[in-house]
Image (spheres, rainbow, N blue to C red):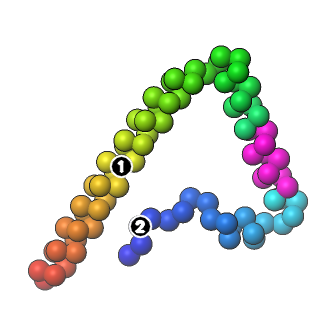
């Protein structure tokens, strides 16, 4: 039972047509450029982004720990049966 799956896998990108690949790369470049522009113009503060990243990382770690505890509990329950 594999619960952890990659959000985006390289094989998914390989299955795209060349035109779709180019579109994805162009879209990525545009979005990265817009993000840099918003940071430079002060629309988004770097400190706010760093604080949000810390909150997201903490939530992800807590969720991972909870999933691991649940998997351990399920394994122990399966052995008991």
Q: Residues within 10 Å of mark 2 (few under 14, many from 20)?
A: few
Residue drawn at point x = 35 percent, y = 55 percent: 64
Q: Reading the chain from its start, which is encountered first: label 1 or label 2?
A: 2
Magenta segment boundaries in residue numbering: 22-31
Q: Residue furthest top?
A: 42
Q: Residue 40: image x %, image y %? A: 70, 21
Compared with 42, 37 (above or below) is: below
Tell whether label 2 touches label 1 (CB within 8 Å). no
Kindly identify which residue carries mark 2.
3
Q: Mainly helix, strand or loop, the magenta region? A: helix
Asked if the magenta segment contains residue 25, the reply would be yes
Q: CA distance from mark 1 to mark 2?
A: 15 Å
Q: Residue furthest left?
A: 80
Kindly identify which residue carries mark 1.
61
Q: Quadrant of residue 65?
A: bottom left
Residue 40 in the figure: left or right of residue 80: right
Compared with 77, 31 (above or below) is: above
Residue 38 in the figure: left or right of residue 5: right
Q: Residue 61: image x %, image y %? A: 36, 49
Residue drawn at point x = 75 percent, y = 45 percent: 28
Secondary structure at numbered mark 1: helix
Residue 57 in the figure: left or right of residue 67: right
In this rendering, which labeled residue sits more in front, label 1 or label 2? 1
Secondary structure at numbered mark 2: loop
């Amino acid at each position: 039972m594999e619960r952890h799956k990659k959000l985006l896998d390289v094989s998914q990108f390989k299955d795209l047509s060349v035109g779709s690949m180019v579109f994805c790369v162009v879209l990525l470049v545009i979005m990265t450029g817009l993000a840099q522009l918003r940071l430079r113009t002060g629309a988004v503060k770097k400190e706010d982004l760093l604080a949000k990243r810390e909150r997201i990382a903490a939530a992800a770690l807590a969720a991972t720990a909870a999933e691991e505890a649940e998997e351990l509990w399920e394994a122990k329950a399966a052995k008991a049966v």
